[in-house]
Amino acid sequence: MQDSMSFGVATADHQCEAYDGNDDIRDLWERARGLTLRGRATDFWNRYREDIDLAKNLGCTAFRLSLSWARLEPQAGVWNDDAFAHYRDLLVYLRDSGFHAIVTLHHNTWPLHVQAAGNGAGLLDVGFPARLETFASKVAERLGDLIDSYVTINEPNQLVYGFIKGFWMRAYPMPPGLPPSATPEMQMDAVLTLIPNLLRAHTRARAAIHQHYPNAKVGANPLVLGLPRWLQNIVDRLATHAKSPAQLRSHAARFGQQTFTERGAVDLVIAQLTMTHARMEHVLFSQAYFTTQLSALHAAATVLPQQRLNWKADVGVINATQGANSVDGSFPDAIVHFYTDLPTALAALRRGEIALIFHDAAMLQAYATEGLALTPMPGTASHYAVATALGHHSVLDAIDRGIIAYRAVHPTLGDTHTRDTLHTLGNAGTIDAAGSEHDAALAAIRKRGVLRVGIHPGVDGLCMRRTPGIAPQDNEYPYEGLEIDLAVAIAKEILQSEHPRIEFVPLQLNERLRAARSWLCVFDGIRRSWAMFGTMVGTNWWNLAMQGKLPEFLCPPECVGALDFVGLDYYWGVPSIWQMQRLAAASECRYSQAPVWPGILEHVLNEAHEQFPDKPIIVIENGCVTSADGFSRAKYLEAHVAEVDRAIARGVPVEAYLCWSITSNREWGLPFDDNSDFGLYHIDLDTDPQLTRTPTEASARYAKIIEEHRVAP
C-alpha cells in the first residue's frame, strides 16, 4: 500500500452476490428460519465493475471482497472453473483500476458439504482446518497473483454464537446452531472445540498461501467491542487464566440460563403480540404463528394519497401496538392520536376526529363495513408469536413443538374471518424434545398442573369469548379461535396431557409483555452484562491467542503469532459499565439501537500496536446503519476517522481504513430497512428492479474525508 493511510470499502459474497441456486449454509439457515432471503442481493456478481467505479470515484484505493467458497467448490473436491474465471476477471478489473485487493476466504458462510463433514460437525470437525487449508491453497494457486492481502476467517470471535446462545436469545444468532437439547454445558463444549479449530484452520490456510506467495499478507479481523478498559482487562483474564475446559464449562450456566426462574402472572402470552426488536429485549418469542399487515381503516370516501410523506392527516393508533411503534415511518408528517383501546379509536373515527386508524388488519377486518374501508400499507408485515419470559428456553421449545404439531393438522389456517391476510405458520423444521428441559420453568408449570395463558379477546377468528348458551363440543374452555386452539396444542406439549388444564387470563394490550415477566425484569441489564462479560465468550480471544496468552487447550502452540497484519472490526461501544446492557442490541442485530462510542477507537488501535509492535494495522470494517445513537452514517464516519487520525499521530501504523459497506446489502437475513442498511450508496433492494445505486450524504462525506487525507505529490 501507499505510505499514507489508504481508504477503502467492502462487499461480501452472500450479502451482495446474486443467489445462483448453489446453496451455502446461510441460504439454508435463512430459509429454515423464515428470514429474508438474499435473492438478487445487490447483483454484485454481474455489476462489480459499477461498484468498483463508485469506490474509485470516492477516492478509495483499497477494496475488500469475499470469495464464495460454495461457488468455487460446489462439491467436495470439485472446483468450478467458471467461478474462478469470474473472480479472476473481477480481480483484474480491481488491479487495473488501481486498487489494493483484500480478499476474505470464509465470510460467515461455508458450503453445505463442509457442514456435512464429520457427520454434520462442520466447523467442529477435526478435518475442518485441512478443508480451509485446501481452499486457501487453491485460491492462492489460481488467483494469488492478483490478491494483495487475505482475511482467512471473518470475525472469528463472532462464530461462537453459532454454538452458544444467551438466556435472553430466542435462537442462535448465526448458523449452524445446535439442537434444543443442547444444555449450556454442551454449548460451551462446542465453543471449546470451535476456538482451537478456527485457530488451526487459520494457521494452516496462512501457511498454504505463503507456499505460493511468501510475501502475501494474511490475517483476520476479530470484532472488537468498545468497553471500559478496566472491564476489558477483567474479561480477558477469564480467558488467559482459565485452568481447564471444566472451569470454563462451569461458567456456561451464567450465559445460557437465568439464575432465578421467573414467575410472571402468566406462563405465556398468545394475544396478537407482534414480534419486534424492541420487544425481544423483554421476552422470548416463539416462531411466528400468524402474519398480518399494518393497514389503515378509514371512511370509504377517503382516498389515501399515493405519497404519504407530507400528508398532514390526523391518524389514530392504539397504545402498545405495532401501529403505534411504526406510525412515524409510515405517516411522518401526521398528527398522531394515541388511544387506550380500539373501540375508543373507532368512535373517534366515526365522529370524524381522525382520518384513519393505523393498526393490524387482523384486528381491523371486522370493522371494514358500514362505510369504512381497509387499505393495507405496503411493506408493513406483522408477525404474531407466543411470548414467554427470558430464560424459559424449555418452555419456548415446547411452545414451538405445539405450533408445529398444530400446523401439521392445519397446514393453512384460513377461514372466512381472516382470508384477506397471510396466515401460514412458519416452517421451522423439527424440534427435538429430548433433553431440552435444562431450566426449571417447565418443571414448575408441570408441578402446578395448570398452564396460565395470557390472551386478548375480541378479535374475530383469533380470540373471542364463546357465545353464551352454546356448549363447546370438544373442550370446556370459555374462549374460541385460532389462538385458543394453539394454546391447547401448546398446553398438550407442556403438560404432556391430551386434556390439559388451562387458565386463560384476559389482558389489555399494554399488559401483554408485563404479564409474562416478574419484578426480576428490573435486573435484566445487569444479568445480561454479567452473562456476556462474565464468561470468556466476551473476550477478544483471537488476539489473545495470537499473542500466546491463552492456555494451550484453547490455542495450539503452532498458532501463536500466525499473522502478517493486525485486522480489526469496530462498530459499537459503551464508556460506562452502567450502559453495558445496551450492547445486547448489537449482538441481536438491532443496529439502529446499538450504542456508538467513537472515543475508544484510538485506544483500541493503540493497544493493538502495543500487543503487536512489528505489525501494520488495518481497520477492516467500520460503519453505521442509517442512524444509530444520535449519529447519522456521515457523522459516524467522520467521528471514527478522526480517532484513527489521532492514533496515527501517536505513531500507530494504521495502514488502511475500510468502510462497511460500498452499497446497501442483504444484512444476514434481516428485513431491509434503516436498521440493516450500511451502504454509502443506497439501493432500494425490495422495490427497485433496476437496483439503482443512489449517492447519500455519507458517500459525499466519505469522499471529502478521503480528499482531505490525500498526500500532495
Image (spheres, rainbow, N blue to C red):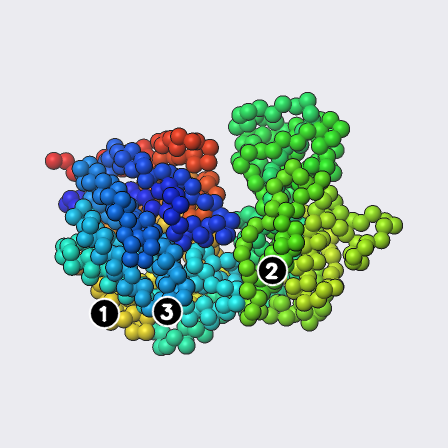
Asked if the residue at tag 3 contacts the one at tag 1, i.e. Cβ–Cβ closer than 8 Å, the answer is: no
Q: Disc 3 vs disc 2: which is toward the camera? A: 2
Picture coordinates of residue 590 (x, y %)? Answer: 47, 49
Picture residue at 73% right of the left edge, 49% below the top: 481
- Is label 2 in a helix, a strand or a loop? helix
Pick the front one: 112 or 152: 112
Pick the front one: 275 or 538: 275
* Image height of 547 relative to 567, above or below: below
Q: Is residue 703 visible?
A: no
Mark identifier at residue 401: 2
Q: From the image, which quarter does the C terminus lie in?
A: top left
Marks 1 and 3 sit apart, C-alpha to C-alpha, by 17 Å
Left or right of residue 329: residue 548: left
- Is label 3 in a helix, a strand or a loop? helix
Mark identifier at residue 558: 1
Mark identifier at residue 193: 3
Picture residue at 45% right of the left edge, 60% below the top: 177
Picture coordinates of residue 410 (x, y %)? Answer: 65, 51
